[in-house]
Image: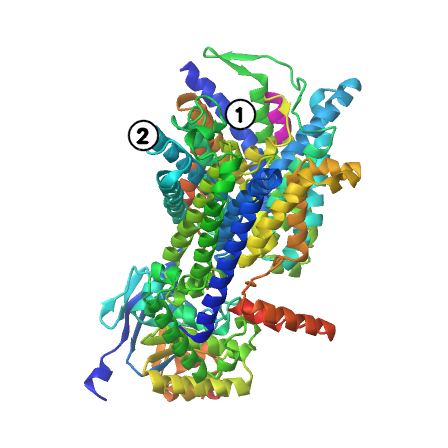
Amino acid sequence: MSEAKRQPILETRGLGISFGGLKAVQDFNLKLSPGELAGLIGPNGAGKTTVFNLLTGVYAPTEGSVILGGEVLNGKKTHQFVAAGIARTFQNIRLFKQMSVIDNVKAAFAKDVKYRMGAALFRTPGYWRAEAALERRAMELLEIFRLERHARELASSLPYGAQRKLEIARALATDMKVLLLDEPAAGMNPTETAELVECISIVRERFGIAILLIEHDMSLVMKLCERITVLDYGQTIAEGSGEEIAANPRVIAAYLGDNDGEEGERLA
Amino acid sequence: MNKTVKRGYIVNGLTAVLAYAAFCVLAATLGQEGGFKLIIAPGIWQCCYLILLAASLNLVLGFMGQLSLGHCGFMAIGAYTAALMSLAFERAGVYDEKSGAAFLAVLFLCIISAGLLAAAFGVLVGIPALRLKGDYLAIITLGFGLIIVNVINNLPFAGQNGLAEGSAAASLYATGLGFGSSDRVAYLWAGVGVTALCVTLMFMFVRSKYGRAVRAIRDDEIAAAASGINTGYYKVLTFAFSAFFAGVAGALYACCNASLSTVSFSFTNGSILNSTFVVVMVVLGGMGSLTGSVVSAVVMFLLNYQIANGAWVDALPGFIQGAFTYPMLVYAVVLIVIIMFRPKGIFGAYEFSLLRTPGELARRLRGLGRGKRANKGGKEAAAQ
Amino acid sequence: MGVFLQTLFVGLRLGSVYALIALGYTMVYGIIRLINFAHGDFIMVGGYTLIFTVPLMTAAGLPAWLAVVIAIAVCALVGVGVELVAYRPVRRKGTGMTALITAVAMSLFLENLAQAIPAIGPNPIIASQLFAPGGFRVAGVTLDFVTIYTIAVSAAVMLLLYVFTQKTRMGRAMRCVSEDKSAAVLMGISVNRTVLTTFAVGSGLSAVAALMYVAQYPKVYTTMGSLLGLKAFVAAVAGGIGLIPGAMLGGLVIGLVESFTTSYISSSLTDAVVFLILIAVLLIKPAGILGKNVGEKV
């Protein structure tokens, strides 16, 4: 591994948040290197999505900090987190439903489209150049996800699996360095899941970004992720490779209650 | 710029030139006659500011998905700004007759200032919109509309004691902006031209990155922020942009009316010009369709005119005629019926285009002939 | 001192009326998350019912204020009718935005319908005396009976309402539905019936408010509820919408602000001040004075 690669792109230090005395997440430390694919797992209510909300500025942390490429992001707004290079998808799909598929992607190119109000209102050549470039780049992204045929349809008319993929495409359009995927395979059938795995691999190769994945499908996490962090009651209870996690007694206890090592085998 | 776009420019440009020529011929031949001068020309003026009002509210209501109930507040600001400015210019002796280059310059200066001041207030209203949405924002905007009327009434140089010195309804003839019937014909081109220009600018706004960002905010604000859109900036911007055109509409109102009173701009009142009526126009035309707003403004104007003056009204049963004395009653029913049975309005999110629409219409008619619903064209356009 | 006391009394009286109306807004908002713009117009309905029934009462030898019983029934019916005819169908199909627009439309409809009915509109009708005139002298200021009644009645109504929501089966059902609709269904609560009851109770309260208002300002007109309702809504929001104590507190605050602005600043600026307060409250504490801030779930 080269020196540049070992330098983490995303780092959190003692990140935590409390809601009225309840510590939803505490002392969360994570280091994500460029090109790495890490998993975040844990039982329901363990605080996984809360971590994502902290990492994207939806919630302001009550302690600790989020550092992206050396820049501390505390106190910034969500769109500034995105501009700095963190993009995400949502557990319950949040597309721009009444917009076309391609407009969903175009809207997310926000910081790359530089023309100003005057150019837009009076349709200067600069406007047309920017829009043409935008169209090209948006189509390229859609092609990666094989959505180009649906470009002009309404986002809400896409089938479920395609909506998930569109959400990832939209996140990629923000030109991020770190991608957070919140249960991307939730509700997908095996074929769709297989396609998704393929997509994630392609994205990793083409964009060289770091990915953090929340997922309930253990086989998917084990297959994809090099490193897994396990949360329970807002605390990190284990961290390591797939095998290490599957063999970790605390993880097994968290998932299954305190007894019974036998079923824990299924995790692997 | 690609080929289709160029063709679109040529077709639209030609149509505009043709329409203008036809309009000049009509105005020249009919201009002196009573009917045109007394009914049609004032009607066109009224349509102009109704179109601007509806289209500009649609930016906020239809495209950004925020209910604003104080839109006429911006219009009031525009109307009073234009009236007071023209009064100042007249007193300063910049012009003394309603003709000539000096008057024209003052006229356009008034219109632009009206828009700019309204836009400044749009920023003020947009700031609460950063933290509030839905119901709360509706109340804030409603409150804003009330405050504006309240404040104008208390201004020493406007309202109760201003303009007309002592009457709530200020005469506009004195200020130069209140056009008489022949001035309305003479400056009709200005009213129509300003309206066409403004609608075009709004169209360009919604068909650019600004429109995409604003619609993204409407569909899902959290996802919009997570896609890197500065939601606060776009909200305030859209409020200001929308208010600008409402202000221009106010200036046009000041041009074509004889008197100005804050009663005209309150939340609900007996006459049709109030913030609720603007909401009716937008919902009727289709939230998210500027074409719809333009068409429904004209339709509502005609309906309103017909209810008040139509000969067919006499043939109706007495109780309906009774209801027509209170047009807002009719519009309230219209609004409820649309919301219940066609919440998207007449046009939904469809936009008219000289290039596409004729072809789509033909296709749709053929489709109807075959007994099929060919609504694919509409869907595609809606997604544009 | 005299002016101050007088202003205070007026403020408390006005505030009690606002609180009664605000309760209606808050109950409906709590349960279906909709600003019932038509609620202000229920006051107008109550006012006219009083106008028409007070002569009947006096003819029957009963005290005039007993007409309020009929007014409560009429208002409750109108409230339930509006919910059944307009709100429920729209809520089923539409979004929050369409529901809100329907509410605005219903308000417009009621106001203009009243104008179009020959027996009612369009000119104001003067109401007869509802309570015996007179009052006490306190520190050189007259505290009239109407003020005392208004404050006492609204305090009693609020207490009753509090007991109703806390102790009765229906009251508990209301709180359940406003907390979580689907969970309420699972508990065997009929959501539709609960919503209807809420409308009935909330609208009935507006009839009581109408009685108190007309007792002080004996004039009834078709748009009387529009500004009154708006200010009461401001009160509900300022206190914390969805909360019954919030509506009471908010009502009193707005009433006092209004009367002190009228006395010490300018009567024509009261509405502006009331709305400025709303904007300030919402910007500083969007959930209202007593409310808790709850963000959208992601």
Q: Residue furthest left?
A: A3
Residue drawn where x is 54% and y is 37% of the image? C230
> Within the image, what quadrant is residue B89 found in?
top left
> Where does label 1 land, which residue?
C13
Kindly report the secondary structure that dominates the magenta region of the rendered protein: helix
Decide if residue B188 is on the left or right side of residue A133: right
Dividing the image into 4 quarters, which one contains the N terminus of chain C? Answer: top left
Q: Which residues fall within the magenta stretch?
A: C209-216
Q: Closer to the observer: label 1 or label 2?
A: 2
Residue B117, position in %: x, y?
37, 42
Residue A240 visible in image: no
> Where does label 2 land, which residue?
B92
Decide if residue B244 is on the left or right side of residue B324: left
Along the line of sight, the residue nearer the viewer: B175 or A25: B175
Q: Is A164 one of the magenta-colored residues?
A: no
Residue A111, position in %: x, y?
33, 67
Mark 2 is on which residue type?
Answer: Ala
Residue B244, position in %: x, y?
41, 48
